[in-house]
Image: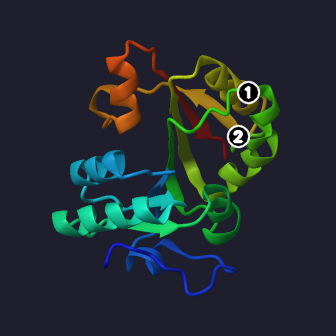
Amino acid sequence: MATAFIPPDYFRRYSVSEIFGSGRECEVDLGCGDGGFLLAVAQQHPERMYLGVERLLGRLRKVCRRADALGLDNVRAVRVESRYLLEWMLEPGSVRRLHYLFPDPWPKEKHHKKRMIQGDIVPVLHRVLSPEGEFLFRTDHEEYYSWVCEIMGASLLFRRGEWNDLASYPATDFQRCWESQGRTIYSARFVRNS
């Protein structure tokens, strides 16, 4: 599968040009699932490069098959934990946007430690993003939304920004499901401070 990015070494950093063959920046879909959002946004913006991150092999294969069938040469997908990729595998300043859409909210308090967004990941997000880069977060879970806004808002590394292009932002499968059930969707955009 041409779309799959299989790192020859999981213990080094990769530039965007090594992953895509060219370019200096990309956008990353953290936990891309079956790729509904990833493929839609890549079709909308063929001039941009998109890296999907997924730890489940079956989902990753599906993303790759669909991207290859659509002829999307601006998409790559990698099988790895999102946090590991951000912390250890991507070059600093190489990501224009991080999309973190409808992750498992781990609603029970005893499971909150499993949430990716914790205070110690904020510097990681800052390091991997380019100047004025963005972290975009969406969820149907109000408490998780408040959690993320509190953690990101407490840092001087990011500022809250307006999300003006929500109308043209492709929906994920989870979003369509939750909206069909009448749930409220919460969205937040955080911009990297220099």
Q: Is residue 67 above or below residue 28?
A: below
Q: Residue at x 62, y 60 (%)?
A: 81
Q: What is the secondary structure assignment of the residue under circle 1? A: loop
Q: Quadrant of residue 91?
A: bottom right
Whole-percent x, y for residue 110 in the image: 82, 32
Badge count:
2
User: Quick one: 28 or 79, which is closer to the camera?
Assistant: 79
- The answer to whether residue 108 is left or right of residue 177 is right
Whole-percent x, y for residue 164 in the image: 38, 26
Q: Residue at x 68, y 27 (%)?
A: 107
Give the class, few, some or many, for how many residues have Cα within 10 Å of label 1's Cα (few <14, many ≥20): few
Q: According to the image, label 1 marks what residue?
A: 108
Earlier in the chain: of badge 2 and badge 1, it is 1
Q: Which mark is residue 115?
A: 2
Q: Is residue 94 above or below residue 191?
A: below
- The answer to whether residue 68 is left or right of residue 11 is left
Q: Quadrant of residue 42?
A: bottom left
